[in-house]
Structures are given as structure tokens and as C-alpha cells.
Amino acid sequence: MNILVVGVGYVGTTTALLFAELGWKVTGFDTDIHKIQALKEGNLPFFEPGLDTLLDKHVQLGNLSFTTDSAQAIRGHHVIFICVGTPSQADGSTNLTYVQKVAEMIGDDMESYKLIVMKSTVPIGTHKKVCQWITDAQQVHLPFDVVSNPEFLREGSAVHDCFHPDRIVIGSDSETAAQQVSMLYKSIASPLVMTNPTTAEMIKYASNAFLATKISYMNELARLCDQVDVSISTVAQGMGLDPRIGRSFLRAGIGYGGSCFPKDVLSLLHTAQDYGIDLNLIRSVVEVNNTQCQYFIKRIRSKLGILRGKRIAILGLSFKPGTDDMREAPALAIIKELLGCGSFLKVHDPVAKLPDGLKTHAIKQYDTIEETLLSVHAVILCTEWSDYVKGDWKAWSHLLKLPYLFDGRNVLDRSQLESWGLNYTGIGNG
């Protein structure tokens, strides 16, 4: 069975490589000519460990090809995965423009039955809209099915998540269509959740909102820990041993970011509002996250005093290690706050590059950690790359003008750092 993947961004490219590795013939379609050409040459348009090796392998073997010819792509494939972007709009709702364009393109170009699988993260009820858009675009009525199959990829761990998923969710009103999609994953050992499309869409949003809630819960609790001289890290350890709570997503820090959590939580809030439901807990999750960076800046100011004119090193730009994705990255919020205070910034990240919009005389990115730390008044760890966590802080401490280290991810060894003369401040460490 030949598979077409429409949209070859992060989700689309990863999905295409998954099915190519599972033995299917896959074609990736996108309107971005430069992106398609790069993929044809074996070059990923983003950073994701291990994915480049799979891309090179399957392009060479001929299991994966790419095209910008929509009509030929749609007519030549029975199964079509929609993997286009669904960005947030100003009011928090989801922009479905790209999804609609793909649906209309499918309706206009299809010449036989198509199994259409929605992999993009879309609001509850979108499958009905997709069905209508396809029907309205058809020249002659032709049968099709729309199945919801949300992705649960973690940036930086996409290869592992593809082949060892926690679950595979398939939502369809047609048992036959659902079985066809499940057959594509037949060689993957994973729990399979078979449900209707609306429930599948809700599972995706509910999952991300719950994880965001755990993060904001710990971040809010950390603020109290700072006042009562308690370590939030020890609290998290004690909590995580309870199997009903679990250990994941309990580390306090400067907040969540990336392409999923901020967008999906806002979309869920907007959907609830459309139905006259106020999700007070989720709204608080967003509020805590939106103010966490300001809280950390107050911690920094309490140690450094006036920030104007201070040289400050920022370690980490991406929203998490293992990716170059800076969408909604807390580091960018920290940077904007410090620039607004008149600080001079020296930044470093192993893979992510400073956005053009932030490049001014007051900020510069350096190639090495040593250059970044030289003669600064303080260091702020914003992303827990192993380069920083396992770095030679004993040697690095001698490069600093002042010994202030602010750990925005609570990942460094406080006692060890203080033994080397560093003045350590985390979040929720008393």
C-alpha cells in the first residue's frame, strides 16, 4: 500500500520515515520547493537526533520520495496522511487554513476512494469539517473516509517515540477504515485505542493539557518553597515515588514552551469557551506559565540588583534539549526581559540559532561555552543540554567576572557548584 504524507515539517517527515522503515512505499508532498529539494538531497530542514540517518537510508533505497505535484500525488496514493501545521491565532483558536487547503485539494484531485488520516493536531470536531471541505470540492461524488490518528512525538526523541509509542490512537466512524489504519502499524508493539474521531481528537488535547498542568503545578509550588526554605526537587522526589503521580514532568523550572503545549492548551480553552464551558484549572495553568519567567527575573534581580549594564550569559535557546525548536521557548522570554532591563547578553546553544528579530548590539551568540562565559556578571541556564549539565563548571567558574549562576531548570548540583565558589540560585530551592 502506497502512502502519501502531505506536509513535510517535523511531524510529516517523521511520519513518512516511520512508515518507510516499516516497509511501506511513501511519498512526501509539500508546496515548499526548497524544503522538498533539501529532503531529496537527504537534508533535514530541522534538527532531530537520528532522523537524518533514516532519511538518507530511505531516500537511497527508494522507499521514500518527495514531490510538489499535488494532483499526481493524490491520484497515485490510496492512503493520505495530513500533517500540515495548525498554528494558534491571536485569540488562542486554531488556524485550520492549511488543513482546509489540503482537504479541498484532495476533493478536487481525487479520482477514486481515499483513506484520509488526520495526523495534525486539530480541535475537537475538525474531522467533520474536513469531510465537508472534501465533499464541497469534489467534481463528482466519490467515497472517502477521514480517520483521526493524533501524534504523540516528543521533540528530541522522535525516533524512539515512533517505534516505541506509549499508545496508538485511531478514531473513526468506519470500522473498516480503522482496521486499515491499524494495519499500517501492524509491526509496532503498542496499546491500541480504537474510538470515534471526536474522542481521538480530545485524547490528544487532554494529554498535552495534563502534562502542562503538572509543569505549572510544580512551578507554582516552587514559589512557595522559596519562601519556606524547602527544596522543590526533594518534594518532587517524594511525590514521584507514588505510582499514582509518577516521576515525569515534576521538575520545576522557567516554564513549558515548544510547538505543542502552549498552542494546544490555548486551543482547548478556546474550544471549551465555544461550548460555554470555563476550564478554570487549565486557565490557571496558562497564567502560571506566562508569569514564571517574570518570577525568575525577580530572583535574578534580588541577587544582582540593577540589571542595566550587566553582562549576562544565556546557556540554551531551544525550548528543550535535543531540538533546535525555539517556538515559545522560555529562553526567549528571559532574553526579552533582560534586554528590556538594559543588560548585555552573551548566548550559546549547541544547535539553535538566535532569531534575526533579536539580533542587536546588546546580544551576541558565541560558538563556544567558554567564550560565552568569559567576563560575565551572571550565568543563566535556560535549556538543560548535556553540554551544560555535564560541563566543567569548576574550570568555567574562573571565567566569570562575578560568580552568580541561575539554574532555570534545576538540573545542576548545587552543593558541588557552591564548593567551587559559585553562588547558585535555582527555582524553589529555598
Image (cartoon, helix red, strand yellow):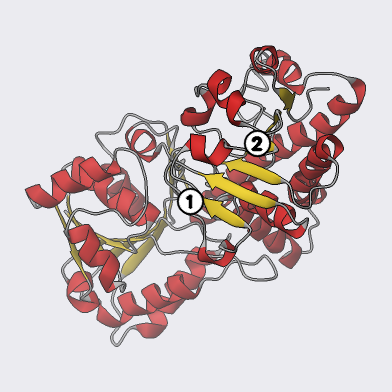
Which residue does the image show at 69% across and 37% down from the upper left? 378
* SS class, disc 2: strand
x, y percentage for residue 271? Answer: 68, 62
Which residue does the image show at 86% across and 37% down from the upper left? 302
Amino acid under disc 2: Val
Instruction: Pick the residue in front: 346 or 137.
Output: 346
Q: Which residue is mark 2?
A: 379
Instruction: Pick the residue in front: 233 or 175.
Output: 233
x, y percentage for residue 84? Answer: 41, 64
Alpha carbon separation for disc pair 2 and 1: 22 Å
Residue 314 shows in the view? yes
Foreground mark, 2 or 1?
2
Q: Report crowding for label 1: few under 14, some 14 to 19, many 20 or more residues within 10 A (C-alpha).
A: many
Tell me the number on the disc at residue 325: 1
Corner quadrant of residue 273: bottom right
Task: Identify the residue at the far left of this view.
Answer: 61
Instruction: Pick the residue in front: 193 or 296.
Output: 296
- 386 in relation to 332, above or below: above
